[in-house]
Structure formats: structure tokens, C-alpha cells
Image (cartoon, grey):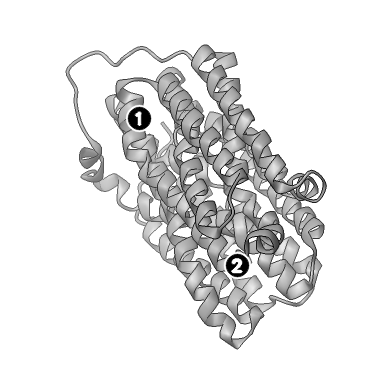
Amino acid sequence: MRSGLALLCLAYVLSQFFRAFLAVLSGPLERDLGTTPDDLAFASGLWFLVFAAMQLPVGWALDRIGPRRTAAGLLFVGGGGGAALFAVANAPWQVSLAMALIGVGCSPVLMASYYIFARQFPPAQFATLAALMLGVGSVGNLVAAWPMALAAETVGWRAALWGLAALSAMAAAGIAALVRDPEAVTGEARGSVLDLLKMPVLWAILPLMFVAYAPAAALRGLWAGPYLRDVFALDTGQVGQATLVMGLAMIAGTFVYGPLDRLLGSRKWVIFGGNFVAALALVALILWPDQSLFLSVALLSLLGFAGASFPVVIAHGRAFIPPHLAGRGVTLLNLFGIGGVGVAQFASGPLHAAASAQGALAGHVAIFALFAGALGLGLALYLFSRDSLD
């Protein structure tokens, strides 16, 4: 199982890469294909929404046919095929289609790991294991920054995508060979996602799940690039370096969050405190969006660090989910988390276009305000949640 989890971790590195690499390709894609930031916001949003929509069938598949075939099959067809389609794209709509297909391929990878953790490890260890997988997998976030910018400037973005297509296919083959499915749950217990949605204990957790990951993921995955170019006139390589710093902060935040619930004796207040800091970082970006490059990169990095609560929110909800619905439970939580990013990207494109009529800076401030308002509302609702540590 260790080698199988290592392959799933590699696949998750690819998943993290694919959700973030458009930020540094915005310049080359505009030059070669005529894409605009709004086109890329749509393509990025499509990745997240398709990824989110796939969580329902993925949850069913994890519970019924196991993580091995679910992850291997979808990653091979979606990840490998989508990256190959991206490599031959000649128009913005083809980039969007490729991103949707890649979203299908990436959709089962992290949840396959979380399903194994939920079924084969003590519940108290779930948050730490989930954070470890997320933190190590977030290396893909780093590769999607300056290294991807360097590859685009040297071998070209098309050659890089062909390499990613081959790597996705090889990772899928390794998962098929090495991952072992947990033993099936015995007994006659049955259920569905509807049974989970009827649980009041989840009603205050799901809204925060919907908005907590969106600010860091959307800014790191796309909007940080246009913001830093428009406001501070950075080139592709410099954008890659700045987003690399934000990516490192997101990884550090993930590792810090992992054991905090056990150290402090609470998941609820760890999650609330961290996301409150993230909201403050967004407010500071609204107030001082063009004060200095150093300040902006520092605030984006603080947002990435404090906004890395994703695995702990999953663990908070997972504590209330019965074993026979483990697959559908973790994927439902993931649906809200990833779906929130997709909705945010779809909303941010038109918002940016409308606000930019007042200037490029106004467009980016509007996006910061969108995320700050959504996160504030999610935190207010989360106050009514019940804590969990078991």
C-alpha cells in the first residue's frame, strides 16, 4: 500500500499542477492563441466545476468498485488525453475543452487517497494524513510556477504539455498496478449523498468548505498572474517566481494545519482562526493593492498560508460520516471545496471585465472584494458548526 499511496501522491502532484499552471501561461497563450484573462478564467473555472461535478460519480465508484480502478481509469483518459489535447490547441475553446477533460482525470486522485485513509487508519489521524498528502502533492503547485514559466520560455508550452500527457499516462498505469483496494464494508447498510445532505451537523460546515479554498486557489491558479503583470509590470519569469513564493506558503500552511487540531484540542477554532487571517489578507489587498510589489506578494503568500485549511475542513466533516458512506462523504466535501473555486472563477471573469472599465487596478480589487465577502459569509455560518476531534 505504501507504493500505491506514493503513486497516488504523484498523481496528486499532477492534479495540483493542472489547477495552477495557467497563471504563468497567460502571456504565451495570449501571444499564440489570442486568449484573454477572461478566457483563461473560464477555462480554469471549467476545470474546477467539472472536477466538482465528477465527485458524485467518483464517490459512488470509490464505495462500489474501489480506488484503484477509479483513479487509474479516469487519470489515464482524462489527464493524459486532456494534456494531449491542450498541447495541440489552436483556439481558446480548445483550451477550455482540454481543461475540462483534465478536470475529469484529476477528480478521483486525492479522494482515492482520502478514502484509503478513512477506511484503513484511525479517525484521529485523518487530518494529519490528509494534510501530509495535500502538502506533498502541492509540489505540483510549485512546478506550475517558475519551472513551468522556464519550460514555456525554453522548450515551449506545447512540448511541456506533451510531457505532462505522457507522465499522466504512466502514473495511471502505476496506480493500476500498485494500489490495493480496502476490504469492502460488511453488512447491509446502504445510503446515498442525499442521506449526507440530510445531516444537520454538516450544514454549517459545507458553506465554509465552498468558500475557504476559493481565494487561494483562484488567485494562485490564475489571477495572481494578470494582477502582478497589470499592476507591477512583471514578465512571465517574474510572475513565475512570485507565484512560486505563494505556492511555498500554501504548502507550509498545509503542513502547519495538519497536527494543529490535536495539539490545540479543536478543529473548529483552528479552521475559523486560519480563515479569519486569510480574510484579513484579502482586506489588506483591497486597501493597498498597488502599495508595493513586496507587500502584495507577502499578502498573497499570507493568504495562501492561512487559506490552506482544506484538509482540516475535510476532517471536520469526515468525523460525522458513517463508514459505509466514507467514499461519498469525502467526495461530497470535496465537491463543495472544488466547486466553490469553479463558481468563483466563472464569477470572477465577468466581474473583472466589468470593473476594469474603471482601470486595470479596479478589476483586480473587485476580485479581492468578491473573495473577501464570500469568505466572511462562510465564516459567519461556520460559527454554528459543532466541533469534532474523534
Tell me the residue at 54%/47% (across/down). 309
Q: Residues within 10 Å of mark 1 (few under 14, many from 20)?
A: many
Query: Relative to 352, does residue 278 appear above or below in the rendering?
Result: above
- The answer to whether residue 189 is left or right of residue 182 is left
* Nearest to N terminus: mark 2 or mark 1: 2
Where residue 140 appears, as percent x and y from the top left, is: 66, 39
Judged from this view, the residue extending furthest toward the bottom is 358
Q: Which of the labelled discs sits on residue 327, or is there none?
A: 1
Tag 1 secondary structure? helix
Query: Relative to 129, does residue 29 appear above or below in the rendering?
Result: below
Residue type (three-letter) at the residue carrying disc 1: Gly
- The answer to whether residue 317 is left or right of residue 215 is left
Judged from this view, the residue extending furthest toward the left is 188
Residue occupied by mark 2: 36
Which of the 4 image quadrants contains residue 314? top left
Query: Relative to 327, does residue 83 appear above or below in the rendering?
Result: below
